Amino acid sequence: MSRAGAPRVGELDVLRGFALFGILVVNALLMAGPATVFGGGPGAPAPDRVAGWLVTALVTAKFYVLFSFLFGYGFVLQARAARRAGAAFAPRHLRRTAGLFALGALHAVLLYPGDVLTTYAVLALVLYGLRGLTVRAALRLAATLLLLLSALLLGYGLLAVALTEPVTATGHAPPAAARAAAYRGDAASVLGTHLRDLPAALGTGLLYAPAMLAAFLGGLAAAKSRLAERRGQDRAWLRRTALRWLPPGLGGGVVAACCVSGPLDGRWFFVGQAATVLTAPALTTSYACGLLLLTRRSRARVPAAAGVLAAGRMALSHYLTQSLVLAWVFSGYGLGLYGRAGTVAVLAGCVLLYAVQLALGAWLAARTRYGPAEHLLRAVTRGRRPRAVPRGLTTPASTAAHPAAPADPEQRADRAGDGVRPAP
């Protein structure tokens, strides 16, 4: 634990850095074409169908839960940092939220309508109103939101199974072909398709907003109880927690995959979503504890560890960069591979892109403390350009001795509150 009482940067940044890969996988498959995320459909090669099934079971929604949890954790750390700096938190939070919303709106229109930054920004205002909740009240509200949403999805899904007929691949073919042609067209065609997709994307965000808010509240409760400080280095507790939550998380993932990616037909989709909403937090918890155990053993020996830490520190920049690259690969902005790449090929590309990001992130972290998007958001939050951070402070706190504390109280508060910053 740091001298300021904040969790070690590495313990939280490493989670965000790994979560970036999970989010990259899901976004890449969705941007490659709606069928790609499910393995390409019944006529696709068997490796693609198996890969899609595994992604649904093990990846989909799990890493967004982790990002949302870290957002809630970071909210509390930012409030503490503002208090230590003697600054009012409300104006800072409002400016940061407005900046996040603006970035998300541009991202949704230009790169990917399935953006979460705008949803995060709106829910951040709700979280501000709930900031006074006790740990127990926050956890109860989070559980209630998850139960209500899963019940809604389950009820709708069972009605769909009982009252509708399966949609055949032939019925999907004409709209899928028109959509593919639009995404492979010129820039105007791509932008027009994004704008037409925005209402549906906003509706999806609204539907799943309770699950995001529940994860925010989980992070709020964890930060208030100082979970990372108390348990972040407790190997026995991490191992016990990872093993306890793995079976229900895997079970829910298997149910979701059977409903969404087969062998059950498309009518079972919302039943699978109900299982995902209810059990994804369990698998996310198991992942998070397991990753902390793994990286605690290997951080000093694996060169990629520095890149993962840097990726977590610059998560917003990496998230936007991922969307920029994916838009160039799959849309008419560049290669126009929408609907032309199989699930396995897309996953291989994700591994390559993530490896490049880790290398570039480690290189950038040796020269600056924050990425370009983080610098911009910090400037908006402060209402002025942030002071330059000396190169001596750019080494991740988990791998270096603590440097001398800055004389500026705002810089001291920033460093104490940097354990988690909002991420997409």
Image (cartoon, rainbow, N blue to C red):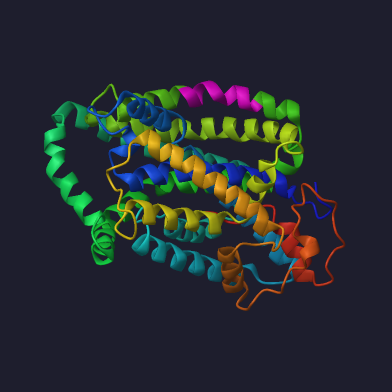
> Which of the two residues, 208 or 151, is positioned nearer the viewer here?
208
Residue placed furthest toward the right? 404
Visible residue check, residue 142 = yes
Q: Residue at x 53, y 45 (%)?
A: 354
Q: Is residue 235 left or right of residue 106?
A: right
- Quadrant of res 101: bottom left
- Quadrant of res 276: top left
Q: Is residue 256 left or right of residue 13?
A: left
Please report the bounds of the magenta region as a residue range: 241-250
Visible residue check, residue 73 = no
Q: Residue at x 30, y 34 (%)?
A: 270
> Which of the two residues, 30 or 62, is positioned nearer the viewer here?
30
Q: Is residue 419 left or right of residue 137?
A: right
> Which of the two residues, 353 or 410, is positioned nearer the viewer here?
353
Relative to 170, say whether 407 is above or below: below
> Which of the two residues, 132 or 161, is positioned nearer the viewer here?
161
* x and y percentages locating residue 365 in the rendered image: 68, 57
Is 162 inside the magenta-drawn segment?
Answer: no
Q: Residue at x 21, y 27 (%)?
A: 161
* x and y percentages locating residue 200 in the rendered image: 27, 53
